[in-house]
Image (cartoon, rainbow, N blue to C red):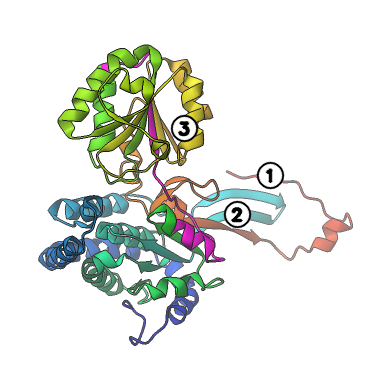
Amino acid sequence: MAGGTGSSNTTIRDTVQRMRIESPAMASTPLSQRDAALVRVKEALLSHQDDIFSANTEDLARAKRDGAAPAVVKRLLFDEHKLKDVCAGIDSLLGLEDPVGRVLLRRELDEGLELTRVSCPIGVIGVIFEARPDALVQISALCLKSGNMAMLKGGSETAESNRTIFSLVHEAAVAAGLPSTCLALAESHAQIDELLGCFGLVDLLIPRGSNAFVRHIMDNTKIPVMGHSDGVCHIYVDVSADLPSAISICVDAKCQYTAACNAVEALLVHRDVAGDFLPLLAGAYAAAGVEIRGDERVRALIDCKSATQEDWGAEYLSPTIFVRVVDSLDEAIDHINRYGSHHTDAILTEDAAAAERFMRLVDSAGVYQNVSTRFADGFRYGFGAEVGISTGKLHARGPVGLDGLVTYKYQLRGHGQIVGDYAEGRSQFHFCDLT
């Protein structure tokens, strides 16, 4: 284990106990200090980029030797482009207001008795993620900016990259005066189960990975879990869609980055435009190397592979897409709510009423009109970055940025008031919200 944890024999429980004790100190650090840490992190990444790329090359070589799937290998890559992206994310975070200490409510309960609701860090967060070493930078930066302690566990596929990047990030944060326990890195698979047993010490777990992985986390811990498993995103091409624009959007949503959780996996096409749209789509996807798996009505219009029941609700993370012809907007909505993963779904239409009905009835964290599902991203939402995407409905939903990493506390200030006076009628509340 790495990062302010004492000796190499220090356990996960030992570390999160220290984090728990020191989290109030982290929460009370001024914004200037947390931002200074982010500046140092960016500088460290840029000045040691050759070390990062060298470590990543080792991970990529090992993954290929082990026969990792192309989608996995693509996620492992940390190159100049990924470095540029994470640095842009840090810059974006630096431009955001402090999420800590915001007054969310100010109310006078009685004269001289004032209640405020103030935002504060969650405390100790455990983030377990597979592959993607750039996620380590994004998660660390968000936790530092929001004043949280973070126990990080990356995938073994990127062990060298994670170790190198974490060392740089942690050293930069501590150099800025943040507690040495602000970040820690778990490095063995066995430590995941140890972390799952830290109920009462860890406030929140955020898993990022496959459906089976996330389900394992949820089934084996009492710690609250926030996150998503599958990214089964849909696009519905409505009868009033602008077809050239729809082709462009469908290509971007599938091909811009096929291994992303917000890449589209299924297209639903209204029967009245299927004859015109599907041949255009087939040509565009053939040029991009995408395999279409269609239902019987699709195959009557274009030459493609036959879809099976397993394709309904499949997450491919590859250049493969399921296509179905539907009879109506409501049939498309029903299909998405049944087979989707409540991540991000889009309607392509020029009909405002149809778009409004779709947005009201599709039960997903992100519901779009006339744009690619690939926009479901914390950086593209202006959050600076994201710690993950939540498809649940409690606390945070969609891309989880700074606002999703804070909670709140109530502060009550008075002048000797006691409840007995109110219970016995000697004093009365006169609730008045203050500006």
Please identify, in this view, whether the residue under mark 2 or under mark 3 is nearer the observer.
Answer: 3
Q: Residue at x 46, y 17 (%)?
A: 327
Q: Amino acid at mark 1?
A: Cys
Magenta span: chief secondary structure = loop
Q: Amino acid at mark 3?
A: Ile
Circle nearer the N terminus (2, 3) = 2
Which residue lies under the disc numbered 3? 336
Quick one: quadrant of the C terminus?
top right
Which residue lies under the disc numbered 1? 432
**Where are the magenta residues, as a range?**
214-243
Gap between marks 1 and 2, in whole Å? 12 Å
Which residue lies under the disc numbered 2? 116
Residue 25: horizontal and vertical position, in percent? 45, 72
Q: Is residue 281 left or right of residue 152?
A: left
Circle nearer the N terminus (1, 2) = 2
Q: Residues within 10 Å of mark 3 (few under 14, many from 20)?
A: many
Q: Amino acid at mark 2?
A: Thr
